[in-house]
């Protein structure tokens, strides 16, 4: 007899937590619209939205098979198709607005494209996770090269401030004009640079400690919490309150930091955020989903 009132009381406590329903998504099979020039996309390895609600995609032309890109040979092997450029901008209806990217003068293009971000000034940031991708690139929206941070190379050192380690994701802080990089598929850290000059600022590993490249045992959810980020350190996001969210994918967690790299310990449904799952990718919502979170 006491069980039902207890459950009812619990429901009353939990129900007000959610201010709105979670967003619901539905696949639109007709998006984007047919590309011009007999173009076809390869593997899409990053998506971003700019201030005009345009959708930017970075994709991998070299992931297409010979049959898929048959029209690109000389002579053509078929009427269709040809690889589209790596960077593509679409409007909400799926119309292609701009397409560019690939090797050029003054910068090193990537072995394997990975990650795209449009910063608050409208610049386009790109990364790569190929074995020799040790850098990120900054372009205008028309594809004009602006800045390279890091350099290609296979040697990995999570405390090297001149080279990245197959970086996965970037995010620019509009308050400080610093670019935060999830670094990455090779290194075990978050690292920060000036977004205009590329000057090094700071870096840190899990729990805000110096990163290490020492080999760690595989993640065990029943074991002690790993003291280092595993590979890949897959995403970085800056929330409106200035906290930095880092995805530690293989360790199945997200860690939250202040901008100076010190660990922040808020609560998430009664658990530390460092225990919340998963750690593949995160994004901040423009709508308040929680009321009075603990």
Image: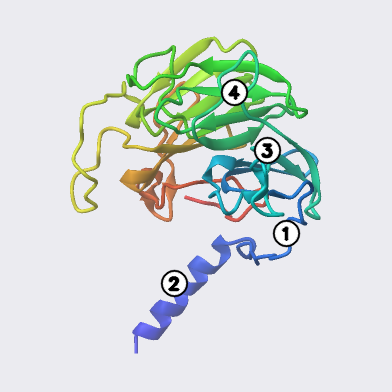
Which residue is located at x 54 percent, y 35 percent?
113
**What residue sits right under mark 1 in the picture?**
31
Looking at the rendered image, the disc whose residue lies closer to the viewer, 3 or 4, is 3
**Quarter that holds the N terminus:** bottom left
Q: Residues within 10 Å of mark 4 (few under 14, many from 20)?
A: many
Q: Earlier in the sequence, mark 1 or mark 3?
A: 1
Q: Given the current orientation, which residue lies at the most extreme bottom position?
A: 1
Nearest the eye: 185 or 287: 185
Q: Earlier in the sequence, mark 4 or mark 2?
A: 2
Which element type, helix, strand or loop, lies under badge 1? loop
Looking at the rendered image, the disc whose residue lies closer to the viewer, 4 or 2, is 4
Which residue is located at x 65 percent, y 15 percent?
105
Q: In the rendering, at what x and y percent does residue 172 appear?
A: 61, 27
**What residue sits right under mark 2 in the picture?**
10
Q: CA distance from mark 2 to mark 3?
A: 54 Å
Q: In the rendering, at what x and y percent does residue 15 appear?
A: 54, 68
**What residue sits right under mark 3 in the picture?**
85
Nearest the eye: 72 or 3: 72
Which residue is located at x 48 percent, y 73 percent?
11
On residue 209, the disc is: none
Q: Earlier in the sequence, mark 2 or mark 3?
A: 2
Which residue is located at x 34 percent, y 21 percent?
158
On residue 137, the disc is: 4
């Amino acid at each position: 007899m006491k069980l039902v009132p207890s459950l009812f009381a619990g429901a009353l406590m939990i129900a007000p937590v959610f201010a709105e329903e979670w967003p619901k998504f539905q696949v639109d099979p007709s998006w984007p619209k047919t590309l011009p020039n007999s173009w076809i996309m390869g593997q899409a390895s990053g998506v971003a939205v700019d201030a005009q609600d345009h959708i930017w995609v970075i994709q991998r032309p070299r992931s297409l098979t010979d049959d898929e890109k048959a029209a690109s040979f000389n002579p053509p092997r078929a009427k269709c198709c040809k690889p589209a450029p790596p960077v593509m901008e679409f409007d909400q209806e799926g119309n292609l607005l701009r397409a560019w990217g690939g090797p050029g003068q003054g910068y090193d293009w990537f072995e394997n494209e990975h990650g795209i971000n449009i910063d608050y000034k409208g610049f386009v940031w790109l990364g790569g996770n190929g074995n020799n991708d040790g850098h990120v690139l900054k372009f205008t929206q028309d594809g004009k090269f602006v800045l390279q941070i890091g350099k290609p190379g296979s040697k990995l050192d999570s405390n090297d401030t001149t080279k990245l380690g197959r970086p996965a994701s970037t995010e620019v802080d509009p308050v400080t004009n610093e670019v935060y990089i999830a670094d990455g598929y090779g290194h075990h850290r978050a690292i920060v640079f000036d977004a205009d000059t590329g000057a090094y600022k700071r870096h840190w590993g899990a729990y805000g400690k110096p990163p290490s490249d020492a080999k760690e045992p595989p993640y065990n959810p029943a074991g002690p919490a790993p003291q280092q980020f595993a590979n890949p350190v897959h995403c970085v996001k800056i929330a409106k309150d200035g906290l930095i969210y880092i995805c530690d994918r293989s360790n199945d967690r997200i860690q939250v930091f202040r901008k100076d790299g010190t660990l922040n310990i808020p609560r998430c449904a009664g658990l530390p955020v460092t225990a919340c799952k998963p750690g593949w990718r995160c994004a901040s919502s423009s709508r308040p989903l929680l009321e009075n979170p603990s």
